[in-house]
Image (cartoon, helix red, strand yellow):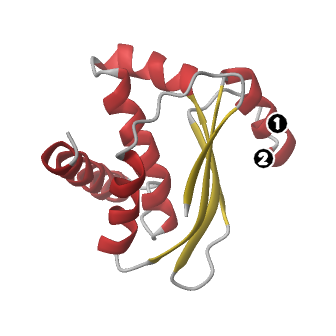
Amino acid sequence: MIQFFFEDVENTIQPNYTNWLENLILTEGKKLGDINYILCDDEYLLKINQDFLQHDYYTDIITFDKVKGKTINADIFVSLQRVIDNAGQIGKSNDEELRRVLAHGLLHLVGYKDKSEAEQTEMRSKEDFYLALFNEKYL
């Protein structure tokens, strides 16, 4: 089950996001477990970054992987402030950038990495694929 929680931010999630994200997991040959998206502000996510990862910088997403075999379980924290800021910098809508970040977290959980240039290219290609799928099926 995919659930969304909001920490001092407004609910910006569209009802069709859940079906789209579930479809991503199933299309990648995995099983849906319990996925919690916690949408928050910069300061909330900075504290998570400091406390759990010992990083002292802002980020748009932190994923806590609880995958068991093929079953995808996780807590995924997303800073809406970072998403909105990033969207403005790259000329995308806030909604499109939010969808990219939501998908990005799941893609890591199903096995995609983004450390090397080749991995980044593959990750971006998968993000683009699922964004196009959202536009086709859910808009």
Hey, what amino acid is under mark 1?
Answer: Gln
Q: Is residue 92 above or below residue 70?
A: above
| Residue farthest right in this picture | 51
- Which amino acid lies under the numbered mark 2 shown in the image of this protein? Leu
Question: Where residue 133 appears, x then y in whole percent?
Answer: 19, 52
Question: In terms of depth relative to the viewer, which is nearer, 95 or 92?
Answer: 95
Q: Which residue is mark 1?
A: 50
User: Which residue is drawn at the image coordinates 33% and 54% (left, top)?
Assistant: 20
- What residue is shown with label 2? 53
Residue 16 percent location from the top left of the image? 34, 46
User: In 3D space, how far apart are the residues under numbered discs 2 and 1 (Cα atoms)?
Assistant: 6 Å
Compared across the picture, whether 68 is left or right of 100 comes to right
Location of residue 136 with respect to 60 vertically, above or below = below
User: From the image, which quarter does the C terminus lie in?
Assistant: top left
Most extreme residue toward the bottom is 69
Mark 2 touching mark 1, by CB under 8 A?
A: yes
Q: Residue 58 at what x, y percent from top left?
A: 66, 26
Q: Quadrant of the N terminus?
A: bottom right
Total numbered circles: 2
Q: Where 15 falls versus 19 (above or below)?
A: above
Q: Residues within 10 Å of mark 2 (few under 14, many from 20)?
A: few
Which residue corresponds to the image point at 70% horizontal and 28% vertical from the top-left? 57
Location of residue 110 (image quadrant): bottom left
Q: Could you say which is closer to the camera, residue 17 or residue 105?
A: 17
Q: Secondary structure at mark 2?
A: helix
For the residue labelled by badge 1, is the local secondary structure a helix, a strand or a loop?
helix
Q: Looking at the image, which residue is at 37% across and 39% down?
A: 99
Left or right, residue 8 beside residue 119: right
